[in-house]
Image (tube, helix red, strand yellow):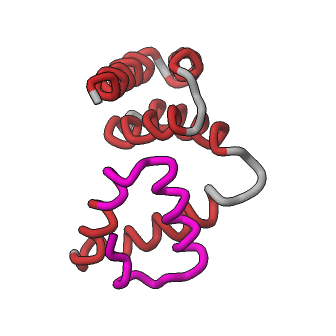
């Protein structure tokens, strides 16, 4: 993974480590490499890695499983399907079970609306099926 074109702050280094552990190299590597060669996305990748993953995800206040729970609830409520797929995988990597994910999406249905929950269940089912193939 070529990260030489990024500002290698401590936050970036920590963020890259956590991002890879949660999301997996198969997602992170293309994102980082494209961002290092594409002037349009470079700054976004620097920001996401350093601040989202390095600053927020590395804080002591919540464990990774709890952060994943919050992420999938918010992404489901907002209808951010692409990111929800990614973070559903991350939630499983962080120790959530399918049943816990189901309960989160039922909660989303009550507080954010049934269509959001239906889409979340559909999205997670695609992720689960894809992971079972691998």
What is the total number of numbered labels drawn onto the structure image? 0
Name, please, the residue furthest toward the front.
134
Determine whether, in the image, residue 83 is placed left or right of residue 92. Answer: left
Quarter the C terminus occupies: top left
x and y percentages locating residue 84 in the rendered image: 41, 36
82 is within the stretch colored magenta = no
Q: Residue at x 59, y 73 (%)?
A: 11
Quarter the N terminus occupies: bottom left
In the rendered view, tell whether residue 69 sits above or below residue 114: below
Q: Nearer the viewer, residue 77 or 21?
A: 21
Q: Residue at x 54, y 65 (%)?
A: 15
In the rendered view, tell whether residue 22 sits above or below residue 113: below
Q: Nearer the viewer, residue 55 or 21?
A: 21
x and y percentages locating residue 125 in the rendered image: 35, 19
Residue 132 lies in quadrant:
top left
In the rendered view, tell whether residue 94 sits above or below residue 96: below
Determine whether, in the image, residue 16 is placed left or right of residue 129. Answer: right
Q: Residue at x 34, y 84 (%)?
A: 5
Q: Main secondary structure of the magenta part?
A: helix
x and y percentages locating residue 87 in the rendered image: 45, 40
Magenta segment range?
1-29
Residue 100 lies in quadrant:
top right
19 is within the stretch colored magenta = yes
Q: Nearer the viewer, residue 97 or 50?
A: 97
Determine whether, in the image, residue 92 is placed left or right of residue 64. Answer: left
In the rendered view, tell whether residue 109 sits above or below residue 64: above
x and y percentages locating residue 120 in the rendered image: 40, 24
């Amino acid at each position: 993974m070529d990260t030489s074109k990024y500002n290698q702050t401590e936050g970036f280094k920590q963020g890259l480590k956590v991002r890879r552990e949660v999301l997996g190299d198969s997602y992170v590597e293309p994102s980082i490499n494209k961002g290092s060669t594409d002037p349009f996305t470079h700054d976004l990748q620097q920001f996401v890695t350093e601040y989202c993953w390095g600053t927020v995800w590395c804080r002591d206040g919540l464990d990774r499983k709890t952060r994943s729970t919050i992420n999938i609830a918010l992404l489901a409520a907002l209808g951010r399907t692409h990111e929800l797929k990614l973070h559903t995988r991350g939630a499983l990597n962080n120790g959530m079970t399918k049943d816990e994910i189901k309960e989160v999406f039922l909660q989303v249905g009550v507080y954010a609306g049934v269509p959001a929950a239906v889409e979340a269940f559909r999205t997670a089912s695609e992720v689960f099926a894809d992971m079972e193939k691998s």
